Image (cartoon, rainbow, N blue to C red):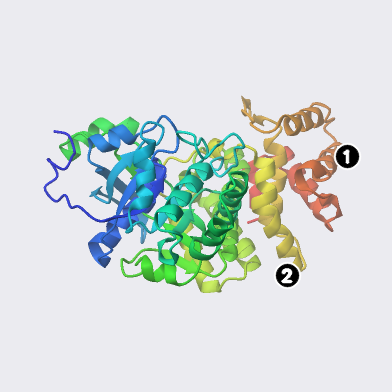
Amino acid sequence: MKLNKGSYKKFKTYTERVIQFGEGNFLRAFVDWQIDKMNEIADFNGSVVIVQPLENGLIDMLNDQDGLYTLYLQGVQNGKAEKKHKIINSVSRGINPYRDYEEYLKLAQNPEMRFIISNTTEAGIAFDENDKLDEVCQKSYPGKLTALLYERFKIFGGAEDKGFIIIPCELIDRNGEKLKEIVLRYADMWNLGQDFVNWINKDNTFCCSLVDRIVPGYPRDTINEVRAELGYDDNLVDVGEIFHLWVIEGPQFVKNELPFQKAGLNVKVVNDMTPYRTRKVRILNGPHTAMVPVAYLYGLETVGESVDHEVIGKYVHELIYDEIIPTLDLPHEELVEFADNIIERFQNPYVKHYLMSIALNSMSKYKTRDLPSLTEFINRKGELPKKLVFSLASLIEFYKGKRGNEDIKLADDADILELYKGLWENYDGTQAGLENIVKTVLGYEKNWGRNLNKIPNLTSEVTRYLSLIEIKGMKKSIKEVL
């Protein structure tokens, strides 16, 4: 039996109010799930029309199932592993604009349409000078969006109440601002007129947003067991963690039009999302990057076993609560609650997050995710944060490319790999040789944007920890910082 409205007896039809660019796992497990919750609990009465942003995608499969799919949410809540699933009934249909451009433009004619949401990958919010207004379908997402907005403007004569609330979810900083900037570039290039530009600026609301939920997606490894459990065929099964957070920077009327709070969703509509972005990067991404060289050289393989480990778990806990949280400006209780959630997410038994999958480009990641915490800790405490410094020393050891007799498959920019290859091949086994490696790495301004040797005592402390790791190994060395 296939999942569709014929087999799903609770199927409901809602008013089409949301246009969504992107049919991938993340949006279906995040945005469409939230709209489903708002329909059930908060009387939102809104469905989503999904626009396929690329020529090839899942729209046909989605339409074949009448927009229905099963979402599994699994993770740790209040210390207990939980796993639950439900059928999502918030998607009305999908459109492939490359095949049916007229149907796509008709979306602009619907007076009930109010929201536009997107996740077209980080590369999706980009300007393509080859896009034309009179083409069958523009290649870029902002090009398609501009054409749709212009159609809306013409159909309703620039009416004030027919603008959209536009919330991109792409993982780039200031995503809403960048999207609006490109739309205005198209308006200029296509000579769409000052009245249209004024309507965009005055009657359409572009929000920046930050999204947070780990979505492994289609469970390829266990799909036979899933089908047996469900009792029906679903080609669009989606898997996500239980935790979710959506921070939307925009006017407060957004909160009134989208009843997140009434539906009990973890969504914040704020005037400035910067502190929340900083919080996520520092408390979620920072410990990920900092733990990789330490835990991997210790002999561990995944995030979950690292956080549960007696020694490495203590290291990660102290890193977050003692060295990262004191560098942030949000209320302490809020930061601790967020960190507690992060620890539970790291412990998720349903997600195998391999350390080596996080190790990609660790040098640049340390710069953006951990270095700000290190320098701010010094500013506020007047001393070096031991765990963050130890992680930096461990990172230099990690780039030696060896874990005992095992080769580490390093993945980074060619210049970084060449730098480390030359340093470690020429290392003569002396303390002076180690200090030369540390000074060269900390002084590599192409990566850091500055010379880290100028930070008082950093060079000597990194060298001391690196020497410990070289002589005693990771298992004995880490005791020095705990």
Residue in view at x 48 percent, y 45 percent: 147
Q: Name the image quarter holding residue 235.
A: top left
**Residue 396 placed where, x, y %?**
72, 40
**Residue 482 placed where, x, y %?**
63, 56
At label 2, the amino acid type is Arg
Residue in view at x 28 percent, y 59 percent: 37
Residue identifier under label 1: 432
**Residue 186 placed where, x, y %?**
58, 46
Marker disc for residue 463: none
Residue in view at x 65 percent, y 66 percent: 327
Task: Report if residue 75 is visible in the image.
Answer: no
At label 1, the amino acid type is Ala
Task: Choose between 353 and 236: the one closer to the eye.
Answer: 236
**Residue 138 placed where, x, y %?**
50, 37
Crowding at dot 1, Cα within 10 Å, few <14 / some 14-19 / many 20+, comes out as few
Crowding at dot 2, Cα within 10 Å, few <14 / some 14-19 / many 20+, comes out as few
Examine the rendered structure and indicate whether residue 230 appears above or below residue 155: above
The quadrant the N terminus occupies is: top left
- Answer with left or right where residue 68 lies relative to residue 203: left
Which numbered disc, 1 or 2, marks the residue closer to the eye? Answer: 2
- Answer with left or right where residue 28 lies relative to residue 122: left
Task: Choose between 344 and 124: the one closer to the eye.
Answer: 124
Q: Name the image quarter holding residue 397.
A: top right
Task: Report if residue 155 is visible in the image.
Answer: yes
- Answer with left or right where residue 267 lies relative to residue 283: left
Task: Choose between 39 and 418: the one closer to the eye.
Answer: 39
- Answer with left or right where residue 203 lies relative to residue 236: right
Residue identifier under label 2: 380
Task: Choose between 91 and 113: the one closer to the eye.
Answer: 113
Q: What element carries label 2?
A: helix
Q: Is mark 1 on a helix, strand or loop?
A: helix
